[in-house]
């Protein structure tokens, strides 16, 4: 009798466990408990990431949006294992065959704090670079911001060329982050100098001109090469512009480029009505007069 009761109990227990594993509402909490995993909307993170590979585009779209809504990456500049997995999965999904899936992945990626590091491997950089040519503006935005987050490694492959082309994008966000990404690449972005100089001289958008001015200073005199005199002249001319940011960034870049010809103009704007511009001019003059700035090639 006792053996029969034990057998029935064991059967019922196994049946209960089987039912628990068969029903998603109980299966995932049970697995999470056994594997010490956190649940996100009743599912482990690996479930949502795995669903990005589903054959149904609608399922992939929901998974991509859910990964953004989960807010796994919360702290700017900080990344843990889960955040790293989410970023890698969303970047990979920027190459999905379905345009709406790519857009959803891009939207979620852009919800991640911009200070969050992205993977530095070649495959990631290639995926972000390819995204710059996408027809969906959100995908281009995700690609260019991701390359900015990647820093100097964004130069890999066709990175500099694609970012240079993105300076002419119809979207303000894409143009702005293309300039920022080229600035972070630094001297290795020298091939972008002619286009940046054109933006600095002629662009109707003040922010574009401001960021082009900043990029020139970070790319440096040696990399700018033969275009340095033209660049210095354009930066000096920009000191007269009404836009505060353009005057400030131009002053800083003149100091970084070792442009001693700009000393008279910088002295004039030390009395600028904006304290940030005046401070930038003072810092530039200090660099030029101390000889710590770059020298013309």
Image: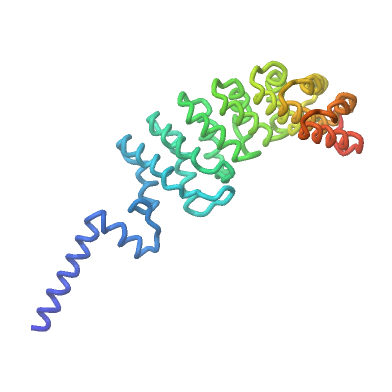
Question: Toward which corner of the image does residue 236 lie, by quadrant?
Answer: top right
In the rendered view, does 170 fall on the left or right side of 30?
Answer: right
In percent of width and height, residue 176 lies at: 61, 28
In percent of width and height, residue 99 lies at: 40, 28
- Above-or-below relation of 274 to 12: above
Seen from this angle, which residue lies furthest front? 273
In percent of width and height, residue 237 lies at: 79, 19
In the rendered view, does 294 fall on the left or right side of 48?
Answer: right
Q: Quadrant of the image for the N terminus?
A: bottom left
Question: Is 19 or 72 nearer to us in this picture?
Answer: 72
Residue 294 visible in rendering: no
Seen from this angle, which residue lies furthest bottom? 2
In the rendered view, does 116 fall on the left or right side of 40?
Answer: right
- Above-or-below relation of 246 to 120: above
Q: At x 41% / y 44%, what residue is drawn?
A: 69
Q: At x 50% / y 38%, what residue is drawn?
A: 110
In the rendered view, does 5 fall on the left or right side of 185?
Answer: left
Question: Toward which corner of the image does residue 271 lie, by quadrant?
Answer: top right
Q: Quadrant of the image for the C terminus?
A: top right
Residue 72 visible in rendering: yes
């Amino acid at each position: 009798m006792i053996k029969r009761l034990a057998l029935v109990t064991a059967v019922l227990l196994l049946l209960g466990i089987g039912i628990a594993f068969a029903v998603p509402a109980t299966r995932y909490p049970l697995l999470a408990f056994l594997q010490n995993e956190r649940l996100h909307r009743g599912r482990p993170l690996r479930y949502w990431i795995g669903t990005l590979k589903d054959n149904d585009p609608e399922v992939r779209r929901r998974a991509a949006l859910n990964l953004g809504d989960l807010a796994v990456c919360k702290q700017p500049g900080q990344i843990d294992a889960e955040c790293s997995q989410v970023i890698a999965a969303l970047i990979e999904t920027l190459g999905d065959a379905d345009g709406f899936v790519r857009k959803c992945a891009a939207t979620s990626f852009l919800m991640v704090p911009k200070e969050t590091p992205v993977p530095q491997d070649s495959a990631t950089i290639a995926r972000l670079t390819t995204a710059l040519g996408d027809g969906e503006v959100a995908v281009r935005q995700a690609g260019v911001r991701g390359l900015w987050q990647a820093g100097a490694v964004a130069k890999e492959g066709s990175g500099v060329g694609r970012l240079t082309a993105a300076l002419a994008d119809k979207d303000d966000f894409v143009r702005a982050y293309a300039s920022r990404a080229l600035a972070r690449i630094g001297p290795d972005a020298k091939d972008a100098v002619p286009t940046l100089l054109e933006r600095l001289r002629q662009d109707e958008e003040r922010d574009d001109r401001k960021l082009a001015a900043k990029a020139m200073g970070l790319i440096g005199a040696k990399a700018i090469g033969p275009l340095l005199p033209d660049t210095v002249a354009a930066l000096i001319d920009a000191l007269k512009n009404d836009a505060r940011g353009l005057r400030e960034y131009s002053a800083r870049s003149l100091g970084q480029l070792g442009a001693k010809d700009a000393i008279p103009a910088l002295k004039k704007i030390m009395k600028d009505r904006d304290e940030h511009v005046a401070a930038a001019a003072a810092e530039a003059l200090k660099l030029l007069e101390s000889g710590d700035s770059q020298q013309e090639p």
